[in-house]
Amino acid sequence: MATEQAPSGLERELERMLEIEKFEPPAGFRAEALWSDPAIYEEAGSDPEGWWLARAKELLDWETEPAQSLNDSNPPFYKWFEDGRLNASYNCLDRHVEAGRGDRIAYHWRGEEGERRDITYAELLDQTQRFANALKGLGVEKGDVVGIYLPMIPEVAVAMLACARIGAVHNVVFGGFSAESVRERMEFSEAKALVTVDGARRKGKTAPIKETVDEHLGDLDSLATIVVVRATGIECPMQDGRDVFFDEACAAADPTCPAEPMEAEHPLFILYTSGSTAKPKGILHTTGGYLTGATTTHRYVFDLKPEQDVYWCAADVGWVTGHSYIVYGPLANGATSVMWEGAPDYPHQGIWWELIEDYRATILYAAPTAIRTFIKWGEQIPAKYDLSSLRLLGSVGEPINPKAWLWYHKVIGGERCPVVDTWWQTETGAIMITPLPGITETKPGSATRPFPGISGEVVSEREGEPVSEGQGLLVLERPWPSMLRTLYKEDDRFIETYFQKFGDGRYLAGDAARRDSDGYFWVIGRIDDVVNVSGHRLSTAEVESAIVAHENVAEAAVIGQSDEQTGQAICAFVTLAGSTEPSEALQEEIRAEVAERIGKFARPKRIVWADDLPKTRSGKIMRRLLRDIAEGRALGDVTTLKDPAVMAELEGKIAAEEADGGG
Ligand code: WT7
């Protein structure tokens, strides 16, 4: 007999709260908020270009102030603030130090083993200048690409800002990606130098990084220099004439390196992200517009008061969230941030709450997948800590289910903190759809409305007409300052991916969404072959190509399957070559292959052995049917299949797997 656990008091309360349709900004919060008048939407909407230009001047220091806002003479290659000149690192560092705020802490860094480093703006500026000079000494020039493959240590911010200081274009690769992925990204972008570490710590273990980098990138001709941060002190091979230690290069460098003013449209960074094909897309962001978007949204979405707040974005710098909301937005705003090296469950499951208590953090920005994990561990863990300093909570990266939203609001926020569910993408550079915490009534699960100066719509797939009821495609209707400028060295793919369907005036986000009777946006998820695992974006094609690299695999089809913990999980249908017999060991080998080629986070959670895959007569794999089958849904239209019997066979397999207790 199935025994059902009686719902706890909290669960009953969350159930009750599910009935509440809207949450008003708490009165105390609204009274103190930077923005509390909804007229801001009309003000920005009536003249978005003028409004954004005013934000660019309000929040940034320009060497030459721009007179121009948008240049749309060559759509969809839009330009912003083109006649202005500024330096991103100057805006993040020098101007605060010059204004007497050099002693303010930029990062409260905490290492996995409890190490503490409090880095002030003055210290960050000093290190950045030294490393900028070191890069110059190594031959890095304006416009050159510099790869950065680092864990969550302060040097990652120093490396990014040093590039920005001299006009080098950084290309950060998330530390969870494999060295093979780093190689691919360095090769595509013709990186001249790479900044990495000796080793990286994760939950008490140290993995050699430099050694692995050497194995995979050693023969890359364009890569003239590898800079190694000594983060763990483990032994690592160094190649004469190519490799240098970060600390030695900085110690030997001149301590002054004036920030070089850049044209507003000078490239600031490339960040590779997954698209519909196996080849990652190099999202290119430029200086003035990007910095305006990141700084404005960071200030007003989080209601940031730099003198009082202690802000913590718990993402990794290797993703766009880290670029915009750990490095550029917070530093440009002069914020004090928490930077945590490790995982949420090391050394214990209460570490996040311990950090919040210790630093009296006031703002927390995290992913729904983390929140769902905390729910699983139980509310008794955060209950042990004093979280009363918190005044605002943010969510990012994937849809947040109403239950998780309510738990976050109640258990972490003590019902006094507004929750901002922020929708955006690597491509958008900054938050696009979000509540304004002192203005917007929130609904759990909805990102609510576009930020002032941004206009979104949900349109029908065929005609592109606004959809008032039901689901459609999410589009952004006008250019905005922090939008991607192109895909690095792939202008055609840029047009094709984002603007071909509805024309140059409408950016196709790649998400499905719906709007409710209040006009609020509810983002459903990707419509392309992109999967979101714990907020990590992956292309099914990329995972497929890693799987078929295994010598015993003939063919593979990968889909995202809904998963309570990670939002989506990777499920792979695999056809083996020749007479290869399926086995547990083979499953592990396939997972290892994916870890080696992409990274551990991309390993398929579920592998289904398939004698054949459902294909159309033209040979296209019908992933839609595989998704139906994996989710246990009734099968959609199968009439276009070349061989409908394939599906019956697969259904049999899935049924057997379930009877086995697997899956
Ligand atoms: C995709 C972009 C946003 C920075 C981190 C991810 C999904 C993101 C939300 C949200 C629903 C969301 C979308 C989007 N997504 N935020 N608040 N609600 N979905 O950036 O790796 O470029 O991924 O993440 O599907 O297209 P990314």
Image (cartoon, rainbow, N blue to C red):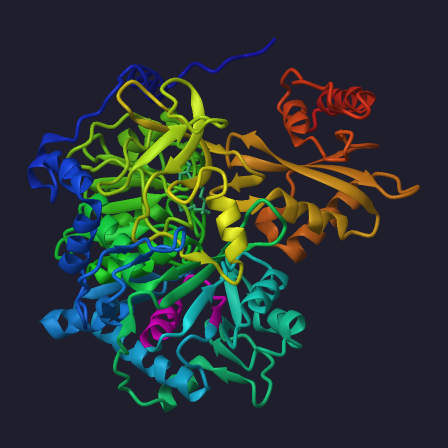
Quadrant of the rendered image containing residue 130? bottom left
Image spot of residue 375 (x, y percent): 41, 32
Q: Position of residue 62 (x, y in %)?
A: 19, 68
Magenta run includes residue 641: no
**Looking at the picture, does residue 580 appear above or below residue 38?**
below
Q: Which of these two is toward me, 613 or 63?
A: 63
- Give the farthest residue toward the front: 73
Q: Is residue 360 visible?
A: no
Where ligand 1 lies, by quadrant?
Answer: top left
Quadrant that contains the C terminus? top right
Name which residue lies at 44% across and 41% down. Answer: 503
Residue drawn 67% across the image and 57% down it: 596
Spot occupied by residue 12 in the image (x, y as percentages of width and height) = 34, 16
Is 152 within the magenta? yes
Magenta-colored span = 146-165
Number of marks in the image?
0
Percent across and percent down for residue 311 are 25, 52
Residue 236: quadrant of the picture: bottom right
The picture quadrant where one finds residue 29 is top left
